Image (tube, coloured by chain):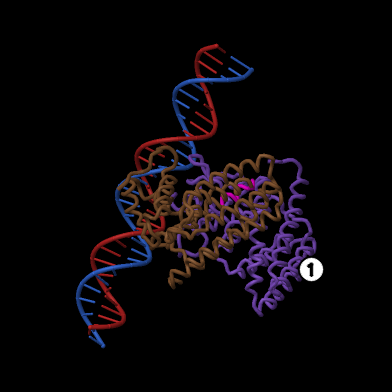
Chain colours: A brown, B purple, C blue, D red
DNA sequence: GTCTCGCTAATTGTTGACAATTTTATCCTC
DNA sequence: GAGGATAAAATTGTCAACAATTAGCGAGAC
């Protein structure tokens, strides 16, 4: 149907991966959907080579599974996968918060202030909890990941874990209204980071992630036993 | 020169990646060495397709860098990269130790006992510190990573971080004699894990990784200012 | 003598065809 | 009618050739 996005520079495989990631995370391609190479190739009007490369990229980032000699599918995350995801996320984001606190400068508090003020207006506009799945929540965590000054850590979070988290939320459109609570937790974390208190920042971040997991797990249980 | 390894089943790309990884981590291919696709293709008597796939795999695991339209090289880890590596490792291994402690069963202590006894004999045979770069140290951490019961965490450690750590040690053949100290730290960690004390296990593991980093950093400084 | 421009050579990116494996459908047997 | 073996279709894995981009080199001008 649609041809390739717009920018014609750069590698074809990366543009393909980008487009496919968008389609998956926007819910147009549901978990379990087959990703046949020939179908994708003629849909994007390219050869199978770049398609293969793009699928490998998405496989590495965890939103596509590839079974040799069988094909690629949009990944279906089990509850065990989700738990593992949040365990790793807790460890990495707590570390990021600690590192960010250790490297905090005088401008840090102001940066957080502007960001959180904007988020507050978003939450006020949609008080039932659009914050958590909107750009706001993701922004906050991305900012801290960037402030950690650790290339590898940032890549793991932004490039691997967050897409999988988004994929996890594709099936559960409306996250329960944790927006206002999450925003409050963010403020406390921001205080600790800006204040240079690494230990508290790490602790609060870890608790924040665990709260998020608890809320999500409750939703997963609510939807009854598609357990696997 | 050498043809492909031995087992002829499985994907060609994965065998190539395996062979290349061995050559890199054994020091036959030094950091910065070019990995031309045509050269590799005719060396392993395969086409460029699987070679490309293998290079992408190694790129994702962090021991090869790929510059678009320029080519692949064995990755050169800067000191900043090394620091980032150990920061992420500390976070993930501390989490692994905590999870392993939480899931410890009655047999756990016995498993550690056998493993550490064998390591003790290795250290006794090479008291100047072969332990750290030998299979012993790696084994211990891999066992804990496996005991955590977290597929994702185990993959990050075994498939991404450890190869990079090995690559880091290619240039510094003889790690200073931290063998006996490391073994002692391992024993204390094993105790905490087997005893189900997650908090202490995580703390000891984090300290253990930091000690390892301190020793390595001292070596890096010793080799003078090849800074970057 | 140094800098810039243009060209040549080499390497990567992409393409389409061939081979091997898996999946599916059909037919036969029990 | 159900189960299993066989064969056909579809899909992935691999190959070799073409196109595009990049890096290196040399000539020429200032």
Asked whether, in this view, residue B55 is left or right of residue B212, the answer is left
**Residue A103 position in % (x across, y down):** 69, 45
Res. B118 visible in picture = yes
Asked whether, in this view, residue B18 is left or right of residue B195, the answer is left
Q: Which residue is mark 1?
A: B124
**Residue A220 position in % (x across, y down):** 47, 67
Asked whether, in this view, residue A65 is left or right of residue B210, the answer is left
User: What residue sits 50% from the left and 49% below the top?
Assistant: A124
Q: Which residues are magenta?
A: A148-155
In the image, residue A214 sits, relative to residue A44, either above or below, namely below
**Residue B158 position in % (x across, y down):** 60, 61
User: What residue sits 59% from the left and 45% below the top?
Assistant: B33
In the depicted view, which residue is nearer to us: B188 or A82? A82
In the image, residue B158 sits, relative to residue C8, either above or below, namely below
Please, what is the dominant secondary structure of the magenta stretch? helix
Asked whether, in this view, residue D2 is left or right of residue A120, the answer is left
User: What residue sits 71% from the left and 51% below the top?
Assistant: A197
């Amino acid at each position: 149907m649609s041809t390739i996005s717009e920018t014609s520079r750069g590698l074809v495989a990366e543009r393909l991966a980008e487009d496919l990631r968008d389609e998956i995370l926007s819910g147009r391609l549901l978990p379990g959907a087959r990703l046949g190479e020939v179908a994708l190739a003629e849909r994007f009007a390219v050869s199978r080579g770049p398609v293969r490369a793009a699928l490998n990229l998405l496989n590495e980032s965890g939103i596509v599974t590839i079974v040799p000699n069988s094909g690629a599918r949009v990944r279906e995350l089990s509850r065990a996968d989700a738990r593992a995801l949040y365990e790793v996320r807790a460890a990495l984001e707590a570390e990021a918060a600690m590192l960010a606190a250790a490297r905090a400068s005088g401008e840090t508090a102001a940066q957080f202030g502007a960001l959180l003020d904007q988020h507050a207006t978003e939450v006020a506009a949609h008080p039932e909890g659009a914050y958590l799945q909107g750009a706001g929540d993701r922004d906050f965590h991305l900012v801290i990941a960037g402030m950690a000054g650790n290339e590898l850590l940032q890549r793991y979070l932004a490039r691997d874990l967050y897409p999988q988290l988004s994929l996890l939320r594709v099936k559960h459109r409306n996250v329960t209204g944790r927006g206002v609570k999450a925003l409050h937790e963010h403020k406390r974390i921001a205080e600790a980071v800006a204040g240079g208190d690494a230990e508290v920042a790490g602790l609060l971040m870890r608790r924040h992630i665990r709260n998020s997991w608890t809320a999500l797990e409750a939703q997963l249980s609510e939807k009854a036993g598609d357990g696997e």
